[in-house]
Amino acid sequence: MANSTLTLIVVSGLVLFWVAFEFLIARVSGWRALARVYPALSAFVGRRYRLCNVGFRRSTYYRSCVTFGTSPEGLFVALFLPFQIGHPPVFVPWSDIVITESKVFWFRRIRLSFKRVPGVWLSISQSLALKILQFFPSRWPSRNAA
């Protein structure tokens, strides 16, 4: 009986820690702020790019767990199921996205900023950006050199 109680306490503690950690990361990265302003209100229909790497502000990084989606209306961003706690899906209209290009060491990065959520940005690889640009080039905002 004591072993099963201790196991239950440890497992419950780990689950609570995981949930708290996910909410903390969502807040620090700016994901929560994006989701408040740009919630994905319906099921996304469009082209998806799964298991992407994305950097957010304050050195938060989501490795191989982000799904991007593109449609004529905008950009969809969601996390892989185990990481969705505290990270509701986001849908940003193309008109609210500002793009800048930068180079970190020898890697080109594309930064997406959001007009209605100043101070929150995400950074993707040039190869992912080119996939999205190729799919909807007329919908992608003009790029600015940084």
Image (cartoon, rainbow, N blue to C red):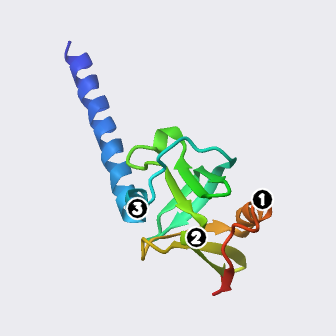
**Residue 69 spot, x, y in % from top left:** 64, 52
Residue under numbered circle 2: 95
Residue under numbered circle 3: 37
Residue under numbered circle 1: 135
Q: Is 117 left or right of 79, judged from the image as shown?
A: left
Q: Is residue 104 visible?
A: no
In this picture, is 1 found above or below 24? above
- Classify residue 100 by image quadrant: bottom right
For this rendering, which residue is in front, 139 or 118? 139
**Residue 88 spot, x, y in % from top left:** 43, 48
Identified by mark 2, the residue type is Ser
Identified by mark 3, the residue type is Val
For the residue labelled by badge 2, is the local secondary structure a helix, a strand or a loop? helix
In this picture, is 73 found above or below 143? above
Q: Point out the frontmost of discs 3 and 2.
A: 2
CA gap between label 1 and label 3 equals 25 Å
**Residue 73 spot, x, y in % from top left:** 62, 58
For this rendering, which residue is in front, 63 or 34? 34
Q: Residue at x 68, y 79 (%)?
A: 142
**Residue 58 spot, x, y in % from top left:** 43, 71
Q: Earlier in the sequence, mark 1 or mark 2?
A: 2
Q: Residue at x 47, y 69 (%)?
A: 59
